[in-house]
Amino acid sequence: MKEYEAVVIGGGPAGMVGASELGSHGVKTLIVDENDIPGGQLVKQTHKFFGDHEHYASIRGFEIAEKLRGDIQGLADVEIATSSTVIGMYPGNTLVYAKDDDIEVKVSYKKLLIATGAMEKQLPFINSDLPGVYGAGAVQTLMNEYGVMPGKRFLIVGSGNIGLILAYQLLQSGVEVRAILEALGKIGGYLVHANKVRRLGVPILFKHTILRAIGDEEVQGAVVAQVDDKFKPIPGTEKELVVDTICIAVGLTPLTELAEQANCEIRYIPELGGYVPVRDERMRTTNPDVFVAGDISSIEEATTAMIEGKISALSMIEEIKDVNLEKEIERELDTLALFRSGPKSVRIRSGLKKFGVKQRPVPSSSQNGLQIGPAGKLRAIVDCTEEIPCNSCEAICKFNAIHIGENINSTPVVDYDKCTGCATCVSACPGLAIYMLKENPDTSTATLGIPYEFLPIPEVGQKMWGMDGNGNYICDVTVKRVIKNPNKTNIIYVEFPLEFAQMVKHTAFPQKSSPIICRCEEVTLEQIEQAIDSGATDFEELKRLTRVTMGPCGGKNCKLIVLGILSRKTGVPISELSHGTSRPPVKPVEFSLFSKGGDPK
């Protein structure tokens, strides 16, 4: 029997922070993790994390794991058992773990921290057992840890942060994401994550679900359909998508088996993710020697898991070493309350109330609209209008031009008198929600600086496509400057016609297939350019030749883009081109309307 003052089960962010805190206070600690290296979910996360700089904001997940491992490995009182799986909890504060599947190790402890995390929820549908159906985390593991891409055309079910992040990572890897399905009528994750994939042309289909996978021996497609308010498929709305991989990202469920065996009371709290151990504000369960932290206690972000891990460890240290750490614990509890004070944490707060854990008073957060700033000055546009816990832009700005305030959930406010256009905030933003903009009236152009995380990196002088927030072609752009950053969020400055200054949000290399300009009539860029090359010189001619703007929207979405193409091809400024004649009806109506007469009663 090996004896320790503290044992930590799980080497994810909660467990590693907890073990680090225990070891730094001289507590003889064992951390048991089933993986080859500790890190949990962090090791396969290539995106930058939200939060504050104390909790590794703007640092990519796998880099956070490296930093936390470094903290533990430098502590003489912390022993790490990797490739080790705890197989049972026993009376007398005893557990047994299997090392490399062939060595049994018995351990006793004074205090125990369970940070076993969670597993992915499954979604039942016809043929869900076909090869090609994966959990989102499994795809991230294959792709980011082992360099294996399981498919070429993906469908993602679920628009929580996991599904949205996976979609972006897949696009970075050069494969196709056909769509993201969401049964609810709104985004499940952060809006900035959703905007990242929308800019790349991935549709998010609200009130949709998957009915079945198509294929005999492997996935060859999927049948999806709209759902009603009770999440029942609506007959007649079915459609097929050609995909070879289906990723399920419908949430996580806590892993509570070891907590149950340790005589901790388990209760079903759906707001926290399902069955979770009952615990108090300081993470102590109904077994006074057992604490929990991370996703086992509530499904949240890595930042809250790390804070919970520290709170648990400090509470354990107080009793093991008979010291008073009240100030440190209170500080962490206040920090945790701040992270949970935003609208995205309403469910967590309501779930914790069922334990009697109430939200601590915190400064109120504020939501501010999109600020455009003064035209003609190179300036930061912060397209972050959702209250989420992050202050990376405020922390990184050396000129104090961005203000968030006491509550980390408040949306940023820019002081354009102080903004110098340095663009440091652009590469620091975890949501890629900041870009630089400058209007150039003398040349009738606009300059846009955007965050860019794809390969190959564009070169100065290259012609690219300017895309809107939904991945639609807007106009051609020219690369004017490329700034390569160590954190791999490069900044690409492009120039394009001034008329599209508020429309272009992203750039893409020209594709072999021509982009659709008029979606209603499915008219492509190539068709419009061919019509101009054949002699069309004004908008009305283009309209008659190609049917652009003649669909249900009446040109609201594409007229300015078509005029921009005509201006580029003919050399005539848009201001001097006729924009055509507007004719009734302004919006589509049924023909039966005209036969009914006009006698309102």
Image (cartoon, grey):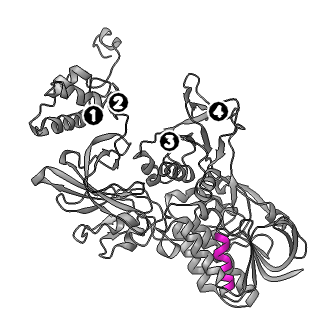
For the residue labelled by badge 4, is the local secondary structure a helix, a strand or a loop?
strand
The residue that mark 4 highlights is 213
Q: What distance separates the C-alpha of mark 2 from that of mark 1?
A: 8 Å
Q: Earlier in the sequence, mark 3 or mark 1?
A: 3
Residue 16 is a magenta residue: yes
Q: Amino acid at mark 1?
A: Cys
Magenta-tinted stretch: 14-23
Left of 528 or right of it: where is 516? right
Q: Tell me whether the residue at label 4 lies in contact with that at label 3, contact meaning CB atoms closer than 8 angstroms.
A: no
Label 3: how many Cα within 10 Å (few below 14, some 14–19, many 20+) = some
Secondary structure of the residue carrying tag 1 is: loop
What label sits on residue 176 in the rendered view?
A: 3
- Across and down, in percent, residue 499 comes to 19, 45
Q: Earlier in the sequence, mark 3 or mark 2?
A: 3
Gap between marks 4 and 3, in whole Å? 18 Å
Please tell me in which quadrant of the rendered image residue 183 appears. top right
Q: How much space separates mark 3 and mark 2, taking CA atoms?
A: 20 Å
Q: Amino acid at mark 3?
A: Glu
Q: CA distance from mark 4 to mark 2?
A: 28 Å
Q: Tag 4: Cα neighbours inside 10 Å, few (<14), some, or many (≥20)?
A: many
Q: Amino acid at mark 4?
A: Ala
Majority secondary structure of magenta residues:
helix
For disc 2, the marked residue is 519
Tag of residue 558: 1
